[in-house]
Amino acid sequence: MRQIMERGRAEAVVATAGAAGSYLLSREADGPVHIPAVAPPGPVVDSNGAGDAYASGFLFGRLAGESFERCALYGAIAGAHACTVPATGGDAIDRAALLAEAAALSAVEADA
């Protein structure tokens, strides 16, 4: 991850690790940050497309001007949701559900 940062213009690099979450390295932080996985909202039926969904959630946050950690949370939520959809079905998480789940998870973190 560091080599990618050093060689390019990337502001952040993410490595996904499935149920173990993901790792975020950005120019804003001193080292990699572990982003915990998010529990899927239903039974896991297929993990195909979870990484693509993670990338979509991350980019959604980035385009909205969110911090890299918030973007990674959005990615984790979208990836977890994708695991509840058979094959590569079109039932992607929508904006309202993504933001509601992020708010709920942030509230839990704030209470901890």
Image (tube, grey):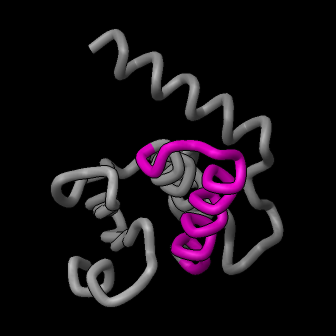
Q: Is residue 7 magenta?
A: no
Q: Quadrant of residue 78?
A: bottom right
Q: Nearer the viewer, residue 13 or 15?
A: 13
Task: Indicate the quadrant containing the C terminus: top left, top right, bottom left or bottom right.
Answer: top left
Q: Is residue 62 magenta?
A: yes
Residue 2 is situated, as x and y percent measured from the top left of the image, at 21, 78
Provide the major secondary structure of the magenta segment.
Answer: helix
Residue 61 is situated, as x and y percent measured from the top left of the image, at 63, 50
Q: Is residue 49 left or right of residue 11?
A: right
Residue 53 is situated, as x and y percent measured from the top left of the image, at 62, 67
Residue 88 in the image: above or below residue 104: below
Badge count? 0
Residue farthest top in this picture: 111
Query: What range of the chain is rendered magenta?
Result: 48-69
Residue 103 in the image: above or below residue 24: above
Task: Indicate the quadrant containing the N terminus: top left, top right, bottom left or bottom right.
Answer: bottom left
Residue at x 51% of width, y 60% of height: 44
Q: Quadrant of residue 88?
A: bottom right
Q: Is residue 93 left or right of residue 7?
A: right
Residue farthest left in this picture: 31
Q: Nearer the viewer, residue 11 or 51?
A: 11
Residue 97 in the image: above or below residue 105: below
Residue at x 32% of width, y 60% of height: 27
Q: Quadrant of residue 22?
A: bottom left
Residue 110 is situated, as x and y percent measured from the top left of the image, at 36, 15
Residue at x 23% of width, y 86% of height: 3
